[in-house]
Amino acid sequence: MKVLVTGGLGFIGSETVVALLEAGHEPIVVDNLCNSKIGVIDRIETITGVRIPFIQADCRDKEAMDKIFSSYQIDGVIHFAGLKAVGESVKLPLKYYENNLLSTLVLIQAMEEHGCHNLVFSSSATVYGDPGELPLKETTPLGTTTNPYGETKKMIERILTDYAHVHPEFNIALLRYFNPIGAHPSGLLGEDPRGIPNNLLPYVAQVAIGRRDHLNVFGDDYPTPDGTCIRDYIHVLDLAEGHVATLNKLNENPGLVIYNLGTGKGTSVFEVIKAFEKASGVKVPYVVAPRRSGDVTANYANVDKAEKELHWKAKRSVEDACRDAYNFQKANPEGIA
Ligand code: NAD
Ligand code: UDP
């Protein structure tokens, strides 16, 4: 398939481009580089031997999107493009609603006009809010989100669901990612946050190479076995492969489908630190800090539906992901140029 990958130079997008190439697809990337670097294209070429077509454009730019659909016979779109920093979304809500909602609306309009009917959307487990039941199933009612970023995901899910009702010719997959971590084993691709990392793994990796002094563990008084929060951490390569499996599913014309992409296994913050230390051989100094507002105690996925319908399963461990994240951080102490 010729697959348009929006946000395809970012953390998950770039790994997915590699997975698409390895599966024999032809990815075409559009990215405005607001949170990624052009050098990622060279790195994808080093890994796969393929120079991917790249268009630097904003998905909110209808003219630019029209031009892409006119230039390439696109069979399907994977829509990663979006802003994702939870804390920033609280400070700058309009920026988040504008970017994430408008880019999706413009994309759908362009797809409709150009007769492209297969879409995979990057949603998030954040749409479940503070879970009443665990593990989370796709049928678990959505909860109250705690920040504008999460709300954009919930709103876009609703928009795409409403749209799919009246456009039966469209196939749309809403993929609810749990916590993507890790990096490409080559050390060439990985998470490269600007400024101080918000997420646990990039922060731990920066502490491990000495770029930061210590990790703050946000709360050790949660009602969990060791007192720290529990998440479902999934290796980004497993997640990338989940997208390839989802494209195959869309070829069966299923209409609107929803899948949790996780491992089904919960891991605490302290367990992540231990796994990282074991995988890297490096001590990760930490101090226990107050809880971070908006954090839920625990969430992890029920992945039965994805396994059964996508014939896909996460294969890699948290320790594998920690090893790959450490190697990436060591090889790129200041990120990707
Ligand atoms: P990322 O920031 O690394 O990648 C997103 C890419 O989109 C970047 O390269 C950025 O430059 C680009 N972009 C943003 N707005 C754009 C626009 N208007 N037009 C064109 N390009 C634009 O993020 P990621 O971690 O790879 O996440 C990809 C998607 O998955 C996002 O939608 C994110 O919300 C979602 N998601 C991420 C996580 C996570 O923990 N990383 C979890 C759940 C869902
Ligand atoms: N966390 C932490 N210190 C950090 C960053 C995160 O203790 O510097 C904790 C956070 O409280 C949460 C877990 O690690 O329990 C995962 O946080 P992350 O931001 O990576 O993911 P999310 O909150 O989106 O699940």
Image (cartoon, rainbow, N blue to C red):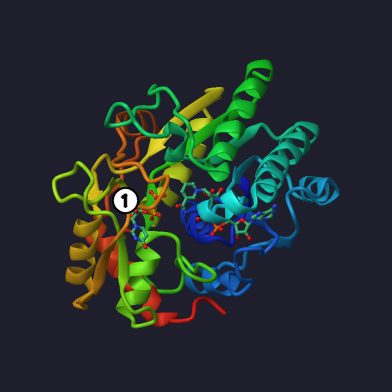
Q: Amino acid at mark 1?
A: Tyr
Residue name at image x 58 percent, y 50 percent: 89
Residue 182 visible (yes or no) = no
Compared across the picture, whether 325 is left or right of 266 comes to right
Visible residue check, residue 134: yes
Residue at x 36% of width, y 51% of height:
238
Q: Position of residue 25 (x, y in %)?
A: 55, 50
Quadrant of the drawing holding the N terminus: top right
Q: Which of the pair 252/61 is nearer the observer?
A: 61
The residue at which mark 1 appears reads as 233
Residue 274 x, y percent position in the rendering: 18, 64
Where is 36 relative to 171, above or below?
A: below
Q: In terms of depth relative to the viewer, which is nearer, 155 or 190?
A: 155
What residue appears at the point 30 percent right and 47 percent down from the top-left corner? Answer: 231
* Image position of 277 with respect to 257: above or below: below
- In the picture as drawn, the residue positioned furthest to the front comes out as 290
Quarter of the rendering occupied by the C terminus: bottom right
Q: Is residue 70 left or right of residue 94?
A: right
Counting from the top left corner in percent of width and height, residue 321 is at: 30, 61
- In the image, farthest residue toward the left: 225
Q: Secondary structure at mark 1?
A: strand
* Image quadrant assignment for residue 308: top left
112 up-or-down from 46: above or below: above
Q: Residues within 10 Å of mark 1 (few under 14, many from 20)?
A: many
Image quadrant in which you'd find residue 270: bottom left
The relative height of residue 116 versus residue 232 in the rendered view (above or below) is above
Decide if residue 291 is on the left or right side of residue 265: right
Query: On the rendering, which quadrant does ligand 2 occupy?
Result: bottom left
- Give the residue drawn at x 66%, y 31%: 117
Instruction: Give the image location of residue 155, x and y in percent.
Output: 60, 32
Q: Quadrant of residue 178?
A: top left
The one nearer the camera, 124 or 87, is 87
